[in-house]
Structure formats: structure tokens, C-alpha cells
Image (cartoon, rainbow, N blue to C red):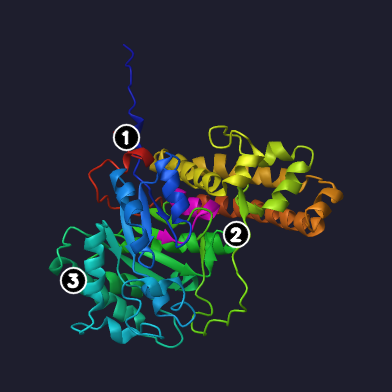
Amino acid sequence: MPTNVVEFPFAAHPTTPVGQYIRLGETAYQRLGSMLVEGRLPATRVVVDASRISHQREIIRAFKAAGAEVVMDTKAAELAAHNKFGGWPKHAPWGAMNPGGPIGPEFFAAKRADDIFGEIARCAVEFGVDAVLAPGHFINAKDFDGWFEVDRRSCEYLREALDREGGSSIGIDYLLVTKHTEINDAAKRSEFVAGLDGLPFDNLWLRASGFGNDAGPLAAARFLSALHGLHNLGKPIISDYLGGLVGEAAVAFGAVSGLAHGIGERERFSASGWEKPPAPRDGQKGGSQKRVSVPGLNRSLSVPEFEVMCSARGGKRLLVCPDRKVCPNGIGDMIADTKRVAAHEALTHLATIAAVPDQRRADHFLEHRVKEVDRNARQVKNLKPKKEEAEQRGVDLERLLVRLADHSDKIGKMRSAFEHMHEEKKDRPHRARPVCPRRDSGTDIEIGQKS
């Protein structure tokens, strides 16, 4: 008599949550707060910079009320750097401990009268954050080679300070800031694992200098493969300052537990030149050029470049956001509200990965997301805008088309590199531990877990 076999796919293929931390930044936080109120930023985890936290009290309350986890970045890495301490970071509550100079290793000793750990703990308690990034510094700094040991002790001192100041329920995540080549080195990885073992933290945050969403195929594949060597620590891994296709690949291949980045920014990190004094200002206002995140292309264009490419035959079909809930008026909405488009891109793609069972994520990512970006990049590079349109908007059309052709070539090679990496690791599907949940509000459910 035939037997009916009932399969239980989710029992055989578990789906673990993915951590996505949105960095509110030092200037973009007001727009992101507005998007939250408008229901357009369903972020479940956010990072606030201590340098702007005094201006973000209401935004922090709004995110917490929405069930989001709030993590505070102490900005210790920037405050210790000659090139960075005099900018936004100096506005952290402890930013003036060394007036006119960086906050060096001597400030992170135990039982100092100025007690930076007490300051951090009291700030965390006052603003009701859920976790704090333990003070982390660029451990490859040229002017001091002992930051790793200082940071290890700082993690323990911060735990003591939080418990003492009424923040025993506030978690600690460890921030490791180093060159990406250090992670590629097996001996260095072993040193990190040994040095971090036993410290009182929940998640390991990795900020890799010289690496980001603009990484080349070889660098990306090598780095993501190397990240698996940190899994022996037994801690979830958050890749800081990483987003886009490379960040999604890190999650899909199980190299990391989650990502931390801004909306359309902070998707790459470099500590190059941090030891040098800042260049004198010329009195003119700076600021980056407004850019539009192009759905399905894994890159952004300046507003004039975007308009020129959309003017080509078939350009709107390839470049304009197809989701009318996000951009009901097409091009106009994409230009007017670039943050909304970038947020939709960042949240949607990672949520798609998170909804796929663990062992199928890499296959799904390669078959759908990577293939789509590769196809779109090839089609976009073949668009033929009119030269008059480019001249009218001050765009060097020849250079723009060369950049788009290079981007298409890079994506094609990235696809091949990811496919090769997947074939090599099919028999070793080890994944980073899932990110530690800290709130009881069901935060993880909407980006991966089933209720």
C-alpha cells in the first residue's frame, strides 16, 4: 500500500534572523526620523552617534516606541585620530576630555579622575539605549600599536561602569577596527579570536579599513571567505560600514550575521590618513553631491547623470524605481527624496535574503539578485543618451558611459567570483551565529523569523 510522505521544509531548512543596523549619521538623522514617522523606514535596529545624541532624544524615543533596538557608537575611534577628532566627533559628551587634541590611550586606563567609561555609561542610561559599542580604535594606527590590548580592557571596564551606573540591562558589542588585509591573514584572525575570547560582549562588530561595497571581485570573495575564520569565536558578526551587493553577499553566504550602514552612505570604511592633521579649510562650504540610488544597479548616479541616462530610449524602464508606492511620480520622486529610495533598496534586499531558509540563501541570492544586477548593468551600459542632453546638464557623457561600462564589467566578474566561491563552500555551509536579540518586541520576526 503506497505511503504518503509529508515534508516539513522549514524543519529541514531553518530560517535564522538577519541583523540590519541603520546608522542615523550626523546629518541625515532628521530625514530618517521623518521617514520613521511617515511609516517609510521600518528599521528594526539603529545606531546613534554619541556626537549627535543630545539632538536625537526624540528620535531615539520614536524608534524605541516602534520596537527598534538602539545602539550607541561612542565615536572613540574618530576621537583618537588626528584627522577626525576636531570634526563632528568632538561633540560627544566625552569629546572635550583632551581640549585641542585626540583622546589617546591614557584616557582609557582604569580609575582615572575623568573616567571616560563612567561618562559613556551615564550617557547610555540617560538616553535609554539598548547597547553600546565598546570603545574601539583603529588598531593599525601608526602612532600607537597597543590599541587592541587597550580596547580589550575597555570592554571589561565599560561593563563594570554600566553595572555601576544602573545600566546592567544594557548590552555591549565589541568594535574591532582593522585593515581588511588583517582579516585575510589566518594568523591574525587567530590572534583576534584568542584575544576576544571571554570578554563580556554579545556581538562582534567588524569595521574593515579599505573595504566596502566598491570592492573588486577578488577582494570581495577573499574577504568574505576569510570572515568564516572568525566564526570560531562563537559570536555573531556584524559587518560595519558595509552595504549594497557585497554586504548582501556576506549575509547570503553566512559570512556575517548582519550589516551596519547608513542610508545611501557609510557603505565603505577607510582609516587611511587618520594619523595626519586635517587639511585647513578654505572657507568655502563643502558637502557631497546629491546622488540617486538606482534600483537593481548597485550604484548611484549624480542627479544630472541620472537625468541624462533616463533621457535615453529605454532609460526610464531600466533606471526608474518600478514600485509606485515608493515613487508614485517616477523620476521626480527619486530626485526629490533620494533617502526614501535608498532606504527601500537597503531594507528590501536584505529582508528578501532573510526570508529564505539558511541553506538556500546563497543559491537564491545568486539566481535572483546577482543575476538581475548583472543583467541591468549590461543593459544600462548600452543606453545611448543624446550628447545635447548631457551638455545641457554639464555631464561628460563619454566619461559617464566608460564608468558604466566598467561597472558592468565589474559586476560580471563579481558574479563569477561569487559563483565560484559558492561551489567551493557547498560542502562546508558553516554560518555565523544569528545576531543576539535584545528586545521582547518581536524585532527579528519581520526580517526573518516566523511567528
Question: Residue 390, position in %: x, y?
Answer: 81, 52
Query: Which residue has dot 3 on it?
Result: 161
Question: Residue 345, position in %: x, y?
Answer: 53, 45
Badge nearest the viewer, 1 or 2 = 1
Magenta stretch secondary structure, dominant: helix
Do callouts 3 and 2 mark residues in contact (Cβ within 8 Å)? no
Question: Residue 157, position in %: x, y?
Answer: 21, 74
Query: Which residue has dot 1 on it?
Result: 450
Q: Residue at x 23, y 82 (%)?
A: 114
Residue sitting nearer the eye, 419 or 259: 259
Question: Residue 163, position in %: x, y?
Answer: 15, 66
Residue sitting nearer the eye, 198 or 79: 79
Q: Answer with left or right where residue 431 lies relative to residue 362.
A: left
The amino acid sitting under disc 3 is: Ala
Res. 365 in view: yes
Query: Which residue has dot 2 on it?
Result: 217
Name which of mark 1 and mark 2 comes first in the sequence: 2
Q: Is residue 75 magenta?
A: no
Quarter-of-image position of residue 397: bottom right
Which corner quadrant holds the N terminus?
top left
Q: Is residue 246 magenta?
A: yes
The amino acid sitting under disc 2 is: Pro
Q: Answer with left or right where residue 170 lies relative to residue 400.
A: left
Query: Quick one: label 1, few (<14), some, or many (20+) residues within 10 Å?
Result: few
**Mark 3 vs mark 1, CA separation in Å:** 37 Å
Residue sitting nearer the eye, 157 or 146: 157
Which segment is the magenta one?
239-253
